[in-house]
Amino acid sequence: MPDWIVSFIAASLGQAFSFLAVVSLVFVVIWRWGAKRLEGRRIRTKGRPFDGAQLRHELVNTGAVLLVGTAQGALISALYDRGLTTLTMDLGALGWGGALALTVGLVLFNDLWFYAVHRTLHTPWLFKHVHSVHHRSVDVNPFTSYSFHVVEGALLGAWVIPALLFVPMPMPVLMAAHVIGTTNNLMAHLGYELLPAWWTRAPLLRWSNTATFHSLHHGQLKGNYGLFTRTWDRLLGTELPSYEQAFAAATASGAPRPATDA
Ligand SMILES: [Zn+2]
Ligand SMILES: [Zn+2]
């Protein structure tokens, strides 16, 4: 068997194992250990609940999306070996300040990219053939995070390789942006709101996305398209008006709960 196939299989298994280990740990802590303890923080209290069929669907699609991610990693590695990327292994001339600024820049760019791709995926043809795979999960949980159609997985990460051809990119910055993106995606699909009640009133923090924000998107199938911040939904008028009320309800036990579905 050629070496590149062996390395591809090893990289795929390594990535799948580490990703599933993290997601399973979050699932066990929040959805099993926390089932009673965090009851008041459960965002979705009615409608079709998470079940075994949903979990199987999510695991199959997550596996396929992880393969796309590994293929992208293999392509980056091949381009790097041929000296075709701007990747450097250390921070180089950027220093810590420049690296931090570039990381923030990448996250903000990814926020806009996600919003634009996601909103496009909600057009009728793309929704039916591609994005409905992700929306099969209504009661979102950590295993929903990477349960996409492979085309969606490729589109969401499509900016990375062009960026590595033109923007000076230290590996630690790329890794930091990847870890922030994965953590944020997991948080958005937690199904429980763990942030404090004052979050949506705090300056700056109120602009960030929350688990409630994205849960409402899955319940209503429209609006709240952003994943990192509320910026583009606010600017373009797509934020669901029930968001702050739903957030208040999920963070204060006993508060009246607005409908999470359309
Ligand atoms: Zn969607
Ligand atoms: Zn989602």
Image (cartoon, rainbow, N blue to C red):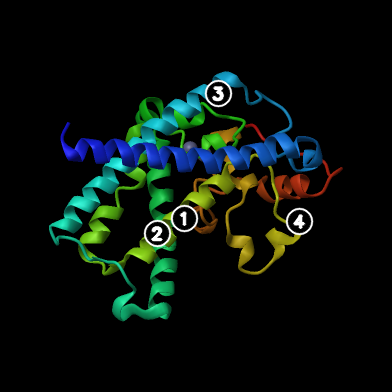
Which of the image's four quarters has the C terminus? top right
Q: Quadrant of the N terminus?
A: top left
Q: Secondary structure at mark 2?
A: helix
Provide residue 130's location: percent of width, then percent of height.
37, 30
> Which of the 4 image quarters holds residue 138?
top right
Asked if the residue at tag 4 contacts the one at tag 3, i.e. Cβ–Cβ closer than 8 Å, the answer is no
The nearer-to-camera label among 1 and 4 is 1
Residue 197: numbered disc: 4
Pointer 2 residue: 175
Name the residue type under label 2: Met
Q: Amino acid at mark 4?
A: Ala
Determine the CA span between mark 2 and mark 3: 30 Å
Please report contact status of discs 2 and 4: CB closer than 8 Å, yes or no. Answer: no
Q: Which residue is mark 1?
A: 179
User: CA gap, disc 1 to disc 4?
Assistant: 26 Å
Residue 238 image position (x, y, % from top left): 52, 48
